[in-house]
């Protein structure tokens, strides 16, 4: 499977996963999909950006570079890894916010 086809499959798998409604997932994958419209692009190469604004509050942003070793995974494994990373990000933000109250 070509890298472009693999990444398109990964995007589809992620988009079809039930994601927390307070989270937006944006893609910066040149040649495949670029959904990031605002701000500056700080990383070279492909990445996925998670924005989590719990209950409409302050937005927390994490960018996940799609490193070459990640791209060697099959689409399902890569999508699962990205989803797992997103879940950890949400847990970390929830932990920080609940500790700040």
Image (cartoon, helix red, strand yellow):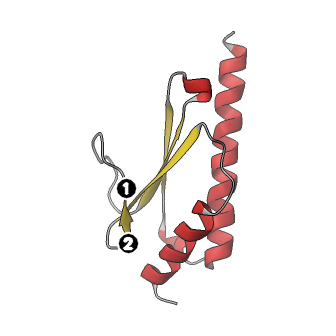
In the image, is residue 64 above or below residue 10? Answer: above
Where residue 15 appears, as percent x and y from the top left, is 58, 61
Residue carrying label 1 = 35
What numbered label is drawn on residue 32?
A: 2
Q: Residue at point 48% right, 65% down? A: 67
SS at mark 1 in the image: loop
In the image, is residue 53 above or below residue 13? Answer: above
Q: Residue furthest bottom?
A: 1
Where residue 72 appears, as percent x and y from the top left, is 56, 78
SS at mark 2 in the image: loop
Residue density around tag 2, few if under 14, some if 14–19, many if 20 or more, within 10 Å = some
- Is 30 placed left or right of 87 in the picture? left
- Where residue 83 sits, quadrant-wise, is bottom right
Q: Residue at point 62% right, 58% down? A: 82
Foreground: 34 or 93? Answer: 34
Examine the rendering and report whether any part of residue 70 can be seen: no
Examine the rendering and report whether any part of residue 65 can be seen: yes
């Amino acid at each position: 499977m070509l890298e472009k086809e693999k990444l398109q499959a990964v995007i589809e798998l992620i988009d079809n996963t039930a994601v927390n409604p307070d989270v937006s997932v944006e893609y910066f994958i040149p040649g495949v999909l670029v959904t990031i419209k605002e701000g500056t692009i700080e990383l070279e190469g492909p990445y996925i950006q998670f924005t989590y604004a719990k209950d409409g509050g302050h937005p927390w942003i994490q960018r996940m570079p799609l490193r070459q070793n990640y791209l060697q995974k099959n689409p399902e494994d890569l999508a699962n890894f990205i989803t797992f990373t997103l879940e950890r990000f949400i847990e970390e933000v929830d932990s920080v916010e609940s500790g700040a109250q």
